[in-house]
Image (tube, rainbow, N blue to C red):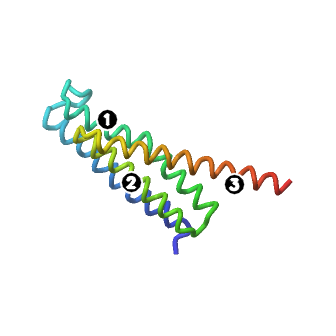
Amino acid sequence: MLPIPVTVCLTGIFALMLTALSLTVSLRRKELGLALGDGDDQVLRRRIRAHGNFIENAPMCILLVLALEAVLATSDTIWWVALVLFVARALHAIGTLARNRALIIPGVLMQHLTFLVCGLWLLIQTISHVSTSM
């Protein structure tokens, strides 16, 4: 059994998602004959933004799941957190590519709320552990 199965699974899924988002940028660049920039092309700009936003947020999602797994070990809660973060990232990417705010907004809210709740919970766990070990 993997020692951190949720983190490993989410990392694998995010690697595939990142590859797909990166390929959409590369393929559009090839279509337009552009090596750099966005050529003022709205489709390429959306693809770059979807890829960029994923790069900005996916690592923190993985670190959050890893930290939860370090504290909670085998709790099913970690799988639910990972699922919420996966859905949030997928909604945001699809919404950005399709220019659909109805998908972007729930994705952003799900991710931010998960970061907030889990971040606070991790801090509380840390403070409680430190205070009891003194």
Residue positioned most to the right = 134
Residue closer to the observer: 31 or 5: 5
Q: Which mark is residue 125?
A: 3
Quarter of the image for residue 96 reads top left
Report the residue at 38% width, 46% height from top.
Answer: 107
Q: CA distance from mark 2 to mark 1?
A: 16 Å
Task: Residue at 18%, 38% (x, y): give it.
Answer: 28
Q: Residue at x 48, y 64 (%)?
A: 79
| Disc with the residue nearer the chain's start (1 vs 3) | 1
Residue 89's x, y, as percent?
38, 48
Residue hosting label 2: 14
Give how far across and how far down residue 72 sits, in percent: 62, 64
Q: Secondary structure at mark 1?
A: helix
| Disc 1 packing (10 Å; few <14; some 14–19; many ≥20) | some
Q: Nearer the viewer, mark 3 or mark 2?
A: 3
Front one among 35 and 69: 69
Secondary structure under badge 3? helix
Disc 2 residue crowd, few under 14, some 14–19, many 20+, Cα 10 Å: many
**Residue where numbered disc 1 is placed:** 49
Number of other residues with Cα within 10 Å of mark 3, as a class: few under 14, some 14 to 19, many 20 or more: few
Nearest to N terminus: mark 2 or mark 1: 2
Q: Is residue 40 above or below residue 87?
A: above
Name, please, the residue furthest toward the bottom.
1
Residue 1 rendering spot, x and y as whole percentages: 52, 75
Q: Position of residue 68 (x, y in %)?
A: 58, 58
| Callout 3 amino acid | Gln
